[in-house]
């Protein structure tokens, strides 16, 4: 219930983006009507700290609530806030390797510092940790974004990263559930197929997600798991059932970007298939205004269960703990012998 006693209406079953540094009047109108669960920022939305904060304020004003605003700030190649205004981070795999035996503490500190950067500009969700288990043959688009090659270690590092973000007031989005490490192609361009046994998937790829099944939000993988289904996880009710029941993930599940070339069909068809499969929320990135409107209409509102999961995720947001940021930076640098930042 809202403080005034009115029932909370269900949010739109979408996460949407914006074209530029400020919202257009047409975007404000669309967001007010569609009431997306949340928003996501990209490099085209980033200029100065004040500008990003202002854009976040406009997004929340359009829907009349403290909607979550997400970003991809993994570090390395995938980070939207960049130098010189923000820290440039090593790729995660390099960071972990440089930290050695101190990797868990180093990952906690890294993502606590990232959370500080995000919260300062109004962003309160990060599409991380990425707990896909890397292989020697994992495609280069993903490989150095991974935390390692051992499922148990990846799970521990993912937990440390998530804990750092939560302590900093940022919602983590664990990805790409149920595991993208077997991908030999880039899912932005084509559909990866993982052709290994269910037993091996469960023992390796699913294991970090099982360990992190209590996290508030997760993002799907556009990957076919042949042992389970011929459809990619995002649109497969068989894989989604596996995520809920075998892996036991109870949080809000959002799709990866439905405009990626791994998925076939029109955006509205993919949106409907994604929700029918069991995703709670559809993520659409880089669409035109008309495409965003059409997807929002096709997606409609969150299901009752989806709304409950959305509200539970939002309840995990809190004010950042009070920390000494310079001391934290110094500690991280010491752990890593100075090899903290990229650029």
Image: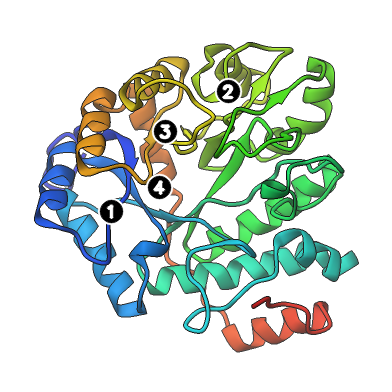
**x and y, in percent, of residue 146 in the image:** 73, 50
Disc ID at residue 309: 3
**x and y, in percent, of residue 240 in the image:** 55, 20
Distance CA(mark 1)–CA(mark 3): 25 Å
Quadrant in which residue 310 is drawn: top left
Q: Name the residue that disc number 4 marks.
A: 315
State the residue at coordinates (68%, 76%). 342
Disc ID at residue 5: none
| Element type at mark 4 | helix
- Please report whichever mark, 4 or 2, sits nearer to the chain's N-terminal start: 2
- Please report whichever mark, 1 or 4, sits nearer to the chain's N-terminal start: 1
Q: Is residue 197 above or below residue 140?
A: above
- Please report whichever mark, 1 or 3, sits nearer to the chain's N-terminal start: 1
Q: Residues within 10 Å of mark 1 (few under 14, many from 20)?
A: many
Q: Name the residue that disc number 2 marks.
A: 233
Q: Nearer the viewer, mark 4 or mark 2?
A: 2
Distance CA(mark 1)–CA(mark 4): 25 Å
């Amino acid at each position: 219930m809202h403080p005034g006693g009115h029932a909370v209406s269900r949010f739109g079953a979408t996460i949407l983006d914006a074209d530029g540094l400020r919202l257009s009047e047409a975007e404000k109108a669309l967001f007010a009507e569609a009431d997306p669960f949340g928003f996501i920022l990209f490099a085209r939305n980033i200029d100065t700290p004040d500008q990003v904060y202002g854009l976040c304020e406009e997004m929340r004003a359009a829907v009349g609530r403290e909607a979550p605003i997400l970003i991809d700030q993994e570090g390395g190649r995938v980070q939207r806030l960049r130098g010189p205004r923000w820290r440039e981070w090593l790729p995660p795999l390099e960071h972990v390797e440089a930290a050695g035996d101190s990797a868990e503490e180093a990952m906690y500190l890294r993502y606590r510092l990232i959370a500080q950067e995000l919260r300062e500009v109004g962003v309160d969700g990060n599409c991380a940790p990425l707990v896909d288990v890397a292989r020697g043959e994992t495609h280069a688009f993903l490989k150095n974004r991974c935390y390692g090659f051992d499922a148990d270690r990846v799970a521990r590092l993912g937990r440390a990263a998530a804990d750092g973000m939560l302590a900093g007031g940022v919602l983590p989005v664990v990805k790409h559930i149920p595991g993208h490490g077997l991908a030999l192609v880039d899912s932005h361009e084509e559909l990866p197929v993982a052709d290994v046994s269910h037993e091996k998937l469960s023992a390796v790829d699913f294991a970090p997600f099982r360990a992190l099944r209590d996290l508030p939000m997760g993002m799907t993988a556009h990957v076919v798991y042949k042992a389970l289904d011929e459809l990619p996880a995002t649109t497969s009710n068989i894989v989604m059932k596996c995520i809920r029941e075998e892996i036991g993930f109870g949080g809000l599940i959002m799709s990866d970007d439905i405009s990626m070339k791994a998925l076939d069909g029109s955006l509205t068809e993919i949106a409907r298939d994604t929700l029918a499969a069991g995703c709670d929320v559809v993520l659409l990135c880089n669409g035109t205004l008309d495409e965003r409107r059409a997807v929002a209409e096709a997606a409609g509102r969150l299901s009752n269960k989806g709304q409950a999961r959305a509200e539970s995720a939002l309840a995990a947001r809190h004010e950042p703990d009070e920390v000494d940021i310079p001391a934290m930076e110094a500690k991280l640098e010491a752990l890593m012998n100075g090899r903290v930042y990229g650029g």
